[in-house]
């Protein structure tokens, strides 16, 4: 009899814990699990939304550009910014005012605090790559922060117009 009462009490306790069915995974999740997910999402959003430094190594790691990631009214995130070599001080080490640039314009999907997906256009113009002509990349690009890095680096690094690697980095606030 005690065993039956105990089993019924456990069943009542389990049934009383709020839960939902996750539409994507079809898994039942408890309110506690959902709260942890929400906390991680909010934490990631705080890290991502705002103004960040932007760099492409061909331009400079001394003179940064900026990119702004905004949360729009519909809940999506936009990303727009640039690093311009023309803003560098001529003859300063690591940067020449030669018209080179990197420009980002698109949307961001936050995977987690260390992984962003950028969907949009990346334009680069570097005097010694692609005969100094602008290179347009359109599509989906992964930006990840690995190890102890304080920035998200674009993972699709191979320059499609030349045998070189582009390090496009968005730095944490």
Image (tube, helix red, strand yellow):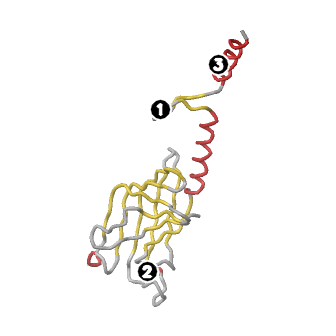
Choose between 143 and 13: the one closer to the eye: 13
- Quadrant location of residue 35? top right
42 in relation to 12, above or below: below
Crowd around label 2: few <14 · some 14–19 · many ≥20 (10 Å): some
Residue 104 placement (x, y as % from top left): 42, 63
Q: Which residue shows up at 54% across the image and 29% down it?
A: 28
Crowd around label 3: few <14 · some 14–19 · many ≥20 (10 Å): few
Q: Which badge, 1 or 2, comes first in the chain's sequence?
A: 1
Q: Is residue 18 left or right of residue 91?
A: right
Secondary element under disc 3, as helix, strand or loop, is helix
Crowd around label 1: few <14 · some 14–19 · many ≥20 (10 Å): few
- Quadrant location of residue 130? bottom left
Choose between 56 and 85: the one closer to the eye: 56
Secondary element under disc 1, as helix, strand or loop, is loop
| The label number, if any, that marks residue 11 in the structure image | 3
Q: Is residue 173 left or right of residue 107?
A: right
- Residue that numbered label 1 is attached to: 23
Q: Which residue shows up at 31% across the image and 65% down it?
A: 136
Instruction: Please count the marks in the image.
Output: 3
Marks 3 and 1 sit apart, C-alpha to C-alpha, by 25 Å
- Residue that numbered label 2 is attached to: 86
44 in relation to 165, above or below: above
Marks 1 and 2 sit apart, C-alpha to C-alpha, by 49 Å
Q: Which residue shows up at 65% across the image and 19% down it?
A: 11
Between circles 3 and 1, the one closer to the viewer is 3
């Amino acid at each position: 009899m005690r065993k039956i009462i105990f089993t019924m009490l456990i069943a009542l306790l389990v049934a009383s814990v709020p839960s939902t069915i996750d539409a994507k995974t079809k898994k039942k999740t408890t309110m506690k699990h959902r709260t942890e997910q929400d906390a991680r999402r909010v934490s990631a959003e705080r890290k991502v939304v705002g103004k960040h430094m932007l760099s492409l190594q061909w331009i400079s790691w001394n003179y940064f550009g900026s990119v702004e990631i905004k949360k729009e009214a519909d809940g999506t995130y936009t990303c727009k910014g640039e690093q311009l070599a023309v803003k560098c001080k001529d003859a300063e080490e690591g940067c020449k005012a030669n018209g080179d640039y990197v420009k980002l314009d698109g949307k961001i999907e936050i995977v987690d605090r260390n992984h962003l997906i950028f969907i949009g256009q990346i334009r680069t113009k570097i005097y010694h790559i692609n005969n100094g002509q602008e290179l347009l990349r359109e599509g989906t690009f992964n930006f990840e922060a690995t190890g102890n890095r304080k920035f998200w680096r674009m993972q699709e690094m191979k320059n499609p117009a030349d045998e070189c690697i582009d390090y496009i980095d968005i730095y944490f606030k």
